[in-house]
Image (cartoon, rainbow, N blue to C red):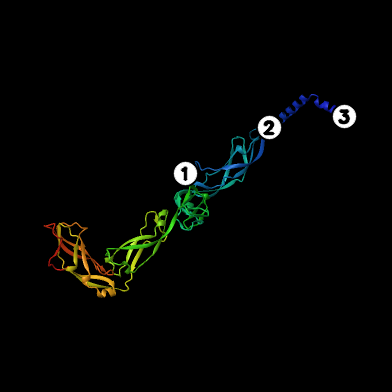
């Protein structure tokens, strides 16, 4: 057996180069015969990608655009051709495109797929699938407002969360005309759960599109154009301020505590980023002139907040009403002797023309008014704060009861007087009267 193996090895090694050459020649002869005798081959190539374009088509000229097409579409192509041209073809040697020539208006189409190659002898015998669904539409661009939704963001106790501020305020949407026309607004949803004690800004959220009837719209058919979105949640200090007002024109001796009043709102909740508001307890509404109070009239003030301060309560005005219980009014005539002009300049004289002031209405507690007389009342004009040249003037006087601190004068009353230059400035200041008719 061993001798046989040795003989076989010698036979194989004998003339080995010639044998290899014979094999190579045989292959060449086979290839040549194949090309000569069987020049055409048939092949099936899979996974040829399909492309689509409107360039140069009627659809493009009419302003149409492709709105739906599966860009991952691939086809299986059966071809035939000369072996030397297509024998090594792969999917990269074929080009599959969608035939858009018949598209002239908006709509959904099942369009043919065309396949071409650079080989002159290549013929396409079958395409699977042979059609593809395409939707075209007119394209429209609009700008819609951007809102914020953050249901899980709140403020810590003692603070208030202001309205979220979103940047940018609008976004641009481009897409099919009919779908674009249904758009109403966009929402940037912040789904974070936070309790804040200071202003917070975030860009972590998701954008949604909504119709005019508040229905969620799939945004896959749109192109969105907007700057990076950020949302700021302002956090404010909270404080409750009590309303207050003051009386104007009240005599120094008048006891304002006798006036019982009621405010339509006792206080207001305010919020501000300014921490100094924490040191404030009262919001001053303004002044009520004592001479305007007749216990039937009400007084309405506008609520004016400082810059940077706002209120979630919606209070815009406060009305003050007085309780008339226990008060009465009575009319008096103030005699000349009780009409006083004080602080007359040393170089001037003031000659009073008014003899008496009649029909002066005085309010006060009923028991006090029973004993009040005209002699208790003074009508006073102070010239200290007024610079008057020579001439005759009519001016309002202040009427009060120096010895009674619970009555006040309602309304305005005038006196007439004449100012002239004093011939002797060193003489004592006096007020003279004439016998003109009382006013």
Please give the residue where the numbered disc 3 appears in the rendered image. Answer: 2
Question: Which quadrant would residue 306 be assigned to in this image?
Answer: bottom left
Q: Which mark is residue 117?
A: none
Q: Earlier in the sequence, mark 3 or mark 1?
A: 3
Residue in the image at 27% along x and 73% along y: 368
Please give the residue where the numbered disc 1 appears in the rendered image. Answer: 61
The image quadrant where one finds the N terminus is: top right
The image quadrant where one finds the C terminus is: bottom left
Q: Is residue 348 visible?
A: yes
- Viewed as shown, does residue 322 lie left or right of 193? left
Q: Earlier in the sequence, mark 1 or mark 2?
A: 2
- Viewed as shown, does residue 13 lie left or right of 254? right
Front-most of 321 and 203? Answer: 321
Q: Under tag 1, what secondary structure?
A: helix
Q: Under tag 2, what secondary structure?
A: helix
Front-most of 324 and 82? Answer: 324
The total of numbered circles placed on residues is 3
Within 10 angstroms of label 3, few (less than 14), some, or many (20 or more) residues?
few
Question: Which quadrant would residue 360 be assigned to in this image?
Answer: bottom left
Picture coordinates of residue 322, whole percent (x, y): 33, 69
Picture coordinates of residue 193, whole percent (x, y): 53, 55
Q: Is residue 162 visible?
A: no
Choose mark 2 or mark 3, whichever is in front.
Answer: 3
The reply to whether callout 3 and callout 1 are in contact (CB within 8 Å) is no
Front-most of 162 and 20? Answer: 162
Q: Which mark is residue 35?
A: 2
Q: Real-space Cα distance between discs 2 and 3? A: 47 Å
Instruction: Indicate whether 426 appears above or below 115.
Output: below
Picture coordinates of residue 312, whole percent (x, y): 42, 59
Front-most of 225 and 331? Answer: 331
Residue furthest left as drawn: 423
């Amino acid at each position: 057996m061993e001798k046989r193996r040795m003989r076989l090895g010698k036979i194989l090694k004998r003339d080995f180069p010639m044998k290899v050459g014979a094999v190579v020649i045989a292959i060449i002869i086979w290839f040549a015969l194949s090309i000569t005798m069987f020049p055409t081959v048939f092949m099936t190539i899979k996974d040829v990608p399909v492309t689509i374009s409107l360039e140069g088509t009627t659809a493009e000229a009419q302003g149409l655009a492709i709105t739906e097409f599966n860009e991952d579409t691939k086809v299986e192509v059966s071809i035939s051709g000369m072996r030397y041209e297509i024998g090594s073809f792969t999917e990269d040697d074929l080009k599959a495109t969608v035939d858009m020539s018949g598209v002239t208006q908006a709509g959904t189409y099942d369009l043919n797929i065309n396949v071409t190659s650079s080989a002159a002898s290549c013929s396409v015998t079958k395409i699977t699938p042979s059609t593809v669904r395409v939707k075209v539409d007119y394209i429209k661009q609009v700008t819609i407002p951007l809102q914020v939704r953050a249901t899980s963001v709140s403020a810590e106790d003692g603070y208030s969360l202001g309205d979220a501020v979103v940047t940018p305020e609008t976004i641009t949407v481009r897409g099919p005309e009919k779908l674009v026309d249904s758009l109403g607004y966009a929402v940037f949803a912040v789904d974070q759960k936070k309790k804040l004690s200071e202003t917070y800004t975030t860009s972590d959220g998701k954008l949604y599109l909504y119709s005019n009837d508040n229905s969620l719209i799939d945004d896959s058919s749109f192109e969105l154009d907007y700057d990076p979105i950020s949302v700021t949640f302002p956090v404010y200090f909270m404080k409750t301020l009590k309303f207050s007002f003051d009386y104007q024109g009240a005599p120094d001796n008048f006891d304002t505590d006798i006036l019982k009043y009621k405010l339509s709102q006792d206080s207001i909740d305010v919020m501000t980023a300014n921490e100094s508001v924490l040191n404030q307890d009262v919001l001053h509404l303004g002044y009520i002139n004592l001479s305007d109070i007749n216990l039937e009239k009400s007084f309405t003030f506008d609520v004016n907040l400082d810059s940077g301060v706002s209120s979630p309560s919606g209070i815009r005005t406060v009305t003050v009403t007085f309780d008339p219980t226990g008060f009465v009014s009575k009319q008096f005539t103030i005699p000349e002797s009780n009409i006083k002009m004080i602080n007359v300049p040393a170089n001037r004289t003031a000659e009073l023309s008014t003899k008496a002031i009649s029909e002066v209405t005085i309010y006060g507690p009923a028991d006090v008014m029973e004993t009040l007389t005209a002699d208790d009342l003074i009508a006073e004009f102070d010239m200290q704060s007024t610079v008057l040249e020579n001439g005759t003037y009519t001016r309002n006087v202040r009427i009060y009861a120096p010895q009674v601190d619970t009555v006040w004068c309602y309304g305005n009353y005038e006196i007439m007087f004449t100012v002239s230059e004093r011939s002797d400035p060193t003489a004592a200041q006096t007020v003279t009267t004439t016998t003109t008719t009382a006013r």
